[in-house]
Image (tube, coloured by chain):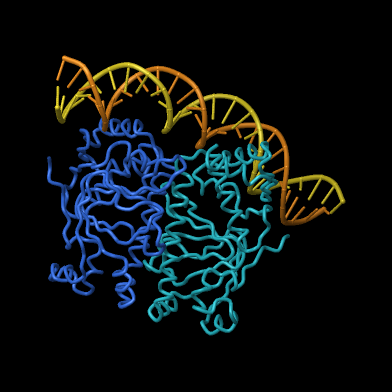
Chain colours: A blue, B cyan, C orange, D yellow
DNA sequence: CGTTGAGTTGATGGAACTCAAATAGCGTGG
DNA sequence: CCACGCTATTTGAGTTCCATCAACTCAACG
């Protein structure tokens, strides 16, 4: 087993909200003062469910959590993956009932911030409110990014874009530059990209044959990011 | 020519923000006090451009405006249509630079609300701020709805969903129940749904042959909404 | 060694895109 | 009002891409 990457308060997307104005200074004290709880989420466990109350905001410290929307075909549709340092259930700030379900793909650790607290902070400080607004908007932008990723783009372009996106997001917090570990299986990737798992597999092997990447199970190395980007854009 | 439907202050999505707490009461006075400008947008004119500054929030009074995102294929990708009573450029509240371009599909009339004013209102009243937050979240939800509309769904399902969605949105403000006028052309619909215009056309004729709808150019009538919904869901 | 589950590879059919041609709308000016 | 031309839309034929089904490999595990 391999120790999964962790993200502390330094990397947390909530940073500026937790410590408005004094980001990354004395990180331990304020967290305690705000009664932020930490929590372990075993692989396969549901963090919150579509249609249920969302009582909290979640920040991923380690692991990988997938977000599912209700879809036509009974089974949920993967609409996003939350990586360490990223935030989940932001849209809950607007409607009390969750529109999505989130499930831990692998064992994960999260910080739990009750909505009541977030709301109080928003009411007190316009700065914090603006910061939250930005987070909500970012969630919307992520949705549109996924839309742009899969629309008008054939399978190999979607897969290339997915890999580049994962690489970029993982490298933000110091994970290996080109060596990346995909926590999710082929089915989840396929579902996310609107493809079948066989097609995802075929795209991986095609890219590997062209020597743009190397794949072995969940371990993946990007050999030529530049060329991969060309495939993504549509060469 | 046909007089396009109009939307007054009563129908405006900004209603609760413009007159917090006294919605629909004395609609004229407050609008004047807030220096809200009205504006005519000729067909084909750009309201704001991707990469440019967005200085204002726009509310559609009449007409039809399409919103485009930068796409791989040079030409923009249609990510949404704004109908009378709906709001445009909300995401601008978070980032000063627009991520989308919006163009009038037909001659339109809009109300223009400067961002500075919106921001001031947010700072003054937590209620207004929450209302804005909801609008921002709604924009994100719209993006995910479009995603769910086109993913894992074949052409005829997408077209059916599009028609049902348009019918629902148009009927909110009193437009004809089942008789609707599509302001946009087939290319725009196709682009929006991630299809080719020929495929959209074929779907229309298929639905017409099955007698679920009637089409003649941009005029469209939904004959059997229930059956159409079945096609949408995936019968 | 057999079992199990994930991943890969191969073969086939169907859906949608592309190119191309025919037709319908629609505004313009005679 | 009608003829004209332009554009939008429809229809047709051929091709491509991907989902599906099925067989196979591979590694982990008891």
The x and y percentages for residue D21 are: 41, 22
Classify residue A54 by image quadrant: bottom left
The x and y percentages for residue A113 are: 26, 64
Up-down relation of residue A122 to residue A189 (above or below): below
Q: From the viewer's perspective, is B177 left or right of B166?
A: right
Classify residue A216 by image quadrant: top left
Q: Quadrant of the C terminus of chain A?
A: top left
Compare residues A68 and A229 and report the one nearer the observer. A68
Q: From the viewer's perspective, is A86 left or right of B189?
A: left
- Number of numbered discs present? 0
The x and y percentages for residue A140 are: 39, 58
Task: Tell me if residue B40 can be seen.
Answer: yes
Q: Residue at x 17, y 62 (%)?
A: A9
Up-down relation of residue B125 to residue A39 (above or below): below
Compare residues A55 and A68 and report the one nearer the observer. A55
Q: Residue at x 55, y 36 (%)?
A: B235
Up-down relation of residue A72 to residue B134 (above or below): above
Classify residue A234 by image quadrant: top left
Q: Quadrant of the N terminus of chain A?
A: top left
The x and y percentages for residue A61 are: 20, 55
Compare residues B204 and B126 and report the one nearer the observer. B126
Q: From the viewer's perspective, is A35 left or right of B225?
A: left
Task: Tell me if residue A165 can be seen.
Answer: no
């Amino acid at each position: 087993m391999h120790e999964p990457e962790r993200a502390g308060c330094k990397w947390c997307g909530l940073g500026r909200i937790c410590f408005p104005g004094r980001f990354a200074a004395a990180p331990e004290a304020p967290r305690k003062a705000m009664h932020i709880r930490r929590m372990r989420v075993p692989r396969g466990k549901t963090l919150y469910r579509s249609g249920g109350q969302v009582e909290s905001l979640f920040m991923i410290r380690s692991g990988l959590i997938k977000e599912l929307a209700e879809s036509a075909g009974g089974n949920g549709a993967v609409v996003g993956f939350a990586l360490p340092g990223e935030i989940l259930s932001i849209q809950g700030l607007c409607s009390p009932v969750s529109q999505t379900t989130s499930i831990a793909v692998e064992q994960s650790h999260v910080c739990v911030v009750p909505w009541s607290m977030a709301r109080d902070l928003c009411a007190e400080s316009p700065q914090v409110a603006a910061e939250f607004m930005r987070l909500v908007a970012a969630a919307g932008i992520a949705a549109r990014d996924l839309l742009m990723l899969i629309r008008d783009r054939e399978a190999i372009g979607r897969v290339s874009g997915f890999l580049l996106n994962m690489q970029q997001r993982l490298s933000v917090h110091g994970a290996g530059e080109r060596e990346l570990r995909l926590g999710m299986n082929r089915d989840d990737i396929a579902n996310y990209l609107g493809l079948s798992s066989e097609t995802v597999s075929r795209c991986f092997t095609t890219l590997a044959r062209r020597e743009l990447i190397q794949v072995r199970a969940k371990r993946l190395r990007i050999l030529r990011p530049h060329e991969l980007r060309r495939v993504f854009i549509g060469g």
